[in-house]
Structure formats: structure tokens, C-alpha cells
Image (cartoon, grey):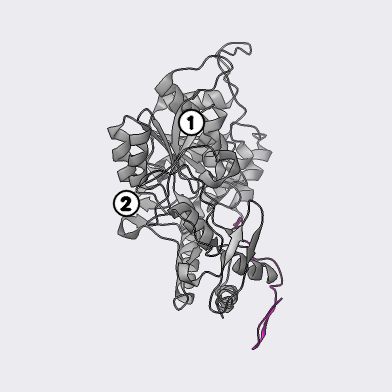
């Protein structure tokens, strides 16, 4: 229980989640329809409808429903790799020995599919403007690794990357772009939906996303051939034969018609969910205006952001001393200062869920030996520079060191949010 001299902030009656599913009732209608008509497997009207509707919404010609966003990323990686390097030999990944530029500050699902195909992720640094891949670092990365032909770029927390600059650099080097729009469904860049910019794009319907199917994801493309290939691969690559004929590797990655029913019921509420998320972001921004913190960026005039998660970053001179190991964090409280760990601990005391910013991939033990490039060049030295200051030495580590994700559930009431804001304020007393 968070106790200060003036009064006590009591825990909420039930947990306030970071971002939980919001059901409306239509989902049950389409799930029941799938059950009543016995279309409960990986074919059915729900899948057909949402593939058509999402493709139209995002301005793509084709969408393919898959079992998860990670499955979609995996098939996107394989598809692009085969376009670039040809079909691999049996037992070899499609990226065998090839390097791929990947967003650094992201969930590891963005990156892992590169490794599934035996590729080697290399991480251009993050930029402060968007918290996404820094185009200047990407340009420097091509100077160091001129043979790279594939980029996996994510839109973090709903804010679009500078995708026009990334596209220009990619085109200069004959590289393809996989656009990870898992967190940014409904966000736009210069009037165009995220999910419309990649050679292949991916979205997610995971349980915490702005539209959910409980699970599920999609690949988006303007190529019928690519869409047909993904559908084939996702159903174990069965050939058109009267028996089970297989001539290439396949996967059990197709979306179920029941999951598609949940998504079908959710889609009409995308606009409402975005409006709720934006209101939460603005209330936090107003509530913190006198604190030494800033909110996560929304991309400026070029962007209309879905505000999937609201985050804050503590000013560097308002950070109390802190240190993080791979699994633990320690801090020394100081008057007028705080750190993400302290704030998250006090939020947990009132049953409100926050979490740290994504730890950059180059700082993850699994990728500690992979290339990492800042706008100033190669940065192979690991950057665990949090002792004493708690501040990182490059953009990604710095944002991770000073930032946290706030409770952003779209069912969060203004009254509940006021309490959360008060808890954060008291951390700086």
C-alpha cells in the first residue's frame, strides 16, 4: 500500500491491466456462427470476411489470416528470403548465413523469425523522434554491411517509423522491407495506414492488441502470387494432388475460423478503441505536465497514432541512481527523483499493471554478439551503462533505462487514471 504523509492510496478493487481485450458481444455472434455451421477449422466465412475487410482497410490487395503475428513474421521472412536468395536446400534456412537489419527496440518476435531461417540479425540503433529504427543508423549500417538485402522494421507502441526515409534507403540498396505493424493497426503515416508500406507487412491480433482475436495475425501484400504462396505454406504446403503430396517445407500456421470470428466482431470497434487510447494518452500527458517526464512520441504532423500504449520517460537529471542486471533492478530513492523500477513497484502496490520499455535486442543475452550500429558507426561494445546515473549511452538503451509503459487499458476510467497519475507524482516527492 502506497503511504504518504497526507493520505493513503488504497489498491483498486480489481487489477488494472496494461492492455486487456475489450469484448462487445458481436464476437460471440460470429464465433457461434462458426460453431453452428460446423466451420471451426482453418476455412470458413469469418476468415474470408476479415481477410477482405482488413486488406481494404489497410489499402492492400491481399491479406492472409495466420495463427499469430509471429507466424506471419516467420512466413514473411521466408518469403522475402526466397525472393532474394532462392529456395534453400533441405535442412537449411532460407537466410543461411545472411545478415538482416532489424529494429532494435522491439519485442523479440520481430527478430526471432530471422534466426528461424538461419539468418543473423544486425541492429541499427533507435531514434528519439519515434522510438523506431533510426534512418541515420540504417544508412551507416549499410556502409558497414553493404551486402544486406532485407530490413525488418517495427512501429513501436503504435507510432509509425520514418518509413519514407527507410524505404528510400532500402531502394538505394536493393533491399526488401518487412513491415512489423503488430502494434500500430489503425495508425497512419502521411494519410496511409501502417501495414501498407512494406514489401510484405504483418499485423497481430494478440490478446493485448488494439483489436484482438485472442491470438492470430495476418500477412499483407499486393501480390496474388505471394498471398497464394503464404496460404500454401501455412497449411503444410500440400500440393494439388488427390493424396498428400509435399514438395517443399510447410507449417501449421493458418488462422482458425473461430479466431477469425472474434476478429470479425472486433473490427467495427477499431475506431472506438483508438479514440479511447488517445484519450488515455492525453490525460496522462496533461497530468504529468509539471513532472520531469515526457510521453512517448507520436510522430508529429505526419502521423495519426493509435496510442496503443502510453509510456513515459523520466528526464535524465531526475533519475535516481539505479542499476539493472539481466534479471534484477536496484535503485536508491532520492527526493525529487525517481526511476522506472520505483514507479512500477508503486503501481503494482495499487494493483495497476505497468511494465518496462522493451529492452533493446542488442542488449539481450541471446543477441549479445550480433552487430549493433549507431548513427556514428559500429558499436560492438555492450552498453550496460546504468550504474550511478541509470542512463544508457545510446538511444535505445537510454529510453529503456529511463522509460516505462503505463496502464493503458481502454476500459480505464478517468477516475482510475487520476489515481495512477497521483501515484506517479508521489514518486517524485
* Point 43% across, 28% down: residue: 80
Mark 2 and mark 1 in contact (Cβ < 8 Å)? no
Residue 208: x percent and y percent?
59, 53
Quarter containing the N terminus: bottom right
Residue 104 position within the rendered picture, expressed as x and y whole percent measured from the top left? 48, 45
Depth check, front residue: 77 or 390: 390
Question: What kind of element bears circle 1?
Answer: helix
User: Dot 1 corresponds to which residue?
Assistant: 77
Which mark is first along the chain, 2 or 1?
A: 1
| Quarter of the figure that contains the C terminus | bottom right
Instruction: Classify residue 414 by image quadrant.
Output: bottom right
Q: Residue at x 58, y 79 (%)?
A: 426
Q: Nearer the viewer, residue 160 or 234?
A: 160
Q: Is residue 204 magenta?
A: no
Q: Nearer the viewer, mark 1 or mark 2?
A: 1
User: Considering only vertical position in the picture, is 171 above or below 92?
Assistant: below
Where is mark 2, residue-wise? Answer: 191
Q: Which residues are magenta?
A: 1-23
Q: Regarding mark 2 in the picture, which secondary structure is present there?
A: loop
* Res 417 seen here: yes
Amino acid at each position: 500500500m502506497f503511504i504518504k504523509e497526507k493520505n493513503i492510496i488504497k489498491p483498486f478493487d480489481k487489477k488494472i491491466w496494461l492492455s486487456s481485450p475489450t469484448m462487445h458481444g458481436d464476437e460471440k455472434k460470429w464465433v457461434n456462427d462458426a460453431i453452428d455451421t460446423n466451420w471451426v477449422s482453418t476455412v470458413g466465412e469469418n476468415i474470408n470476411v476479415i481477410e477482405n475487410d482488413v486488406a481494404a482497410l489497410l489499402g492492400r490487395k491481399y491479406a492472409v489470416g495466420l495463427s499469430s503475428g509471429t507466424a506471419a513474421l516467420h512466413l514473411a521472412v521466408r518469403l522475402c528470403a526466397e525472393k532474394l536468395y532462392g529456395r534453400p536446400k533441405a535442412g537449411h534456412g532460407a537466410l543461411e548465413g545472411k545478415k538482416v537489419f532489424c529494429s532494435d527496440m522491439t519485442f523479440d518476435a520481430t527478430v526471432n523469425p530471422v534466426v528461424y531461417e538461419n539468418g543473423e540479425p544486425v541492429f541499427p540503433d533507435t531514434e528519439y523522434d519515434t522510438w523506431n529504427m533510426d534512418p541515420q543508423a540504417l544508412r551507416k549500417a549499410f556502409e558497414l554491411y553493404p551486402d544486406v538485402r532485407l530490413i525488418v522494421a517495427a512501429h513501436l507502441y503504435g507510432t509509425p517509423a520514418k518509413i519514407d526515409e527507410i524505404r528510400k534507403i532500402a531502394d538505394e540498396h536493393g533491399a526488401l522491407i518487412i513491415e512489423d505493424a503488430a502494434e500500430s493497426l489503425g495508425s497512419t503515416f502521411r494519410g496511409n495506414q501502417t501495414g501498407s508500406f512494406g514489401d510484405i507487412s504483418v499485423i497481430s491480433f494478440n490478446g493485448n492488441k488494439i483489436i484482438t482475436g485472442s491470438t492470430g495475425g495476418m500477412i499483407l501484400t499486393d501480390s496474388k502470387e505471394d498471398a497464394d504462396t503464404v496460404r500454401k505454406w501455412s497449411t503444410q504446403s500440400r500440393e494439388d494432388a488427390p493424396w498428400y503430396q509435399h514438395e517443399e517445407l510447410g507449417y501449421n500456421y493458418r488462422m482458425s475460423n473461430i479466431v477469425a470470428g472474434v476478429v470479425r466482431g472486433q473490427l467495427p470497434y477499431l475506431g472506438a478503441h483508438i479514440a479511447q487510447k488517445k484519450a488515455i494518452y492525453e490525460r496522462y500527458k496533461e497530468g504529468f505536465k509539471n513532472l520531469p517526464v515526457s510521453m512517448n512520441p507520436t510522430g508529429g504532423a505526419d502521423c495519426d497514432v493509435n496510442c496503443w500504449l502510453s509510456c513515459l520517460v523520466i528526464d535524465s537529471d531526475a533519475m535516481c541512481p539505479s542499476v539493472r542486471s539481466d534479471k534484477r533492478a536496484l535503485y536508491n530513492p532520492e527526493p525529487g527523483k525517481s526511476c522506472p523500477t520505483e514507479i512500477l513497484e508503486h503501481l503494482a502496490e495499487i494493483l495497476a499493471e505497468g511494465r518496462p520499455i522493451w529492452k533493446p535486442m542488442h542488449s539481450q543475452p541471446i543477441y549479445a554478439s550480433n552487430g549493433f550500429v549507431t548513427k556514428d558507426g559500429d558499436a560492438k561494445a555492450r552498453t550496460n551503462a546504468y550504474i550511478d546515473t541509470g542512463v544508457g549511452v545510446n538511444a535505445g538503451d537510454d529510453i529503456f533505462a529511463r522509460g516505462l509503459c503505463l496502464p493503458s487499458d481502454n476500459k480505464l476510467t478517468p477516475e482510475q487514471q487520476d489515481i495512477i497519475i497521483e501515484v506517479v507524482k508521489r514518486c517524485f516527492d
